[in-house]
Amino acid sequence: MNAVNSSHLHHEFCPLDTTIKIISGRWKSIILCRLKDQSLHFNELSRQIPECTRRMLALQLKELVNDGILLRVIDGQKISYQLSPLGHRLLPILLEMNDWGKTYLMQKKSSL
């Protein structure tokens, strides 16, 4: 199911489901954070995220490009990835989710 179709996942209109679908994926948030300040080639991303297999990286990049979050830029023989305007609008949401996660983990850790 693509991100647009997931807006009606629960048989009612829910844009939140679309957002969750777009960012779901084990490596997508890390990819987006790596690209927040710069464009990178596939090999550069692969070196920065060594735990992610090249196949999985290619799949996650393809999904982010298809969803309009990343741009695949071809310059001669070189291909790089960068955030699209929609991707730049998504960054503050991801950063806020990261901050929320830190707070949540600190509260959970202190309650143990």
Image (tube, rainbow, N blue to C red):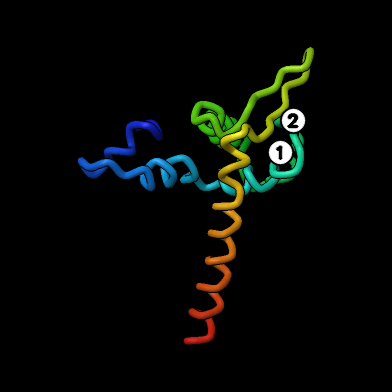
Q: Residue at x 58, y 69 (%)?
A: 102
Q: Which residue is drawn at 69% across and 41% down?
A: 35
Q: Residue flagged by tag 1: what amino acid is it?
A: Leu
* Image quadrant in which you'd find residue 11: top left
Q: Nearer the viewer, residue 112 or 70?
A: 70
**Residue 109 horizontal/vertical position (percent):** 53, 81
Q: Which residue lies furthest to the bottom in this view?
A: 111
Q: Which residue is drawn at 60% across and 52% down?
A: 92
Tell me: 103 left or right of 77: left
Crowdedness of circle 2 by 10 Å Cα count: few (<14), some, many (20+)? Answer: some
Tell me: 112 left or right of 80: left
Q: Is residue 105 above or below residue 41?
A: below
Crowdedness of circle 1 by 10 Å Cα count: few (<14), some, many (20+)? Answer: many
Q: Which residue lies furthest to the top in this view?
A: 76
**Residue 15 horizontal/vertical position (percent):** 37, 43
**Quadrant that contains the N terminus:** top left
- C-beta proximity under 8 Å, tags 1 and 2: yes
Q: Which of 104 and 92 is in front in this view?
A: 92
Residue annotated with mark 2 = 41
Q: In this view, does 92 lie above or below 21?
A: below
**Residue 23 horizontal/vertical position (percent):** 49, 44
**Residue 60 horizontal/vertical position (percent):** 54, 35
Residue annotated with mark 1 = 45
Q: Residue flagged by tag 2: what amino acid is it?
A: His
Q: In this view, does 70 lie above or below 89?
A: above
Query: Could you tell me which secondary element the residue under label 2 belongs to?
Result: strand
Query: Could you tell me which secondary element the residue under label 1 belongs to?
Result: helix
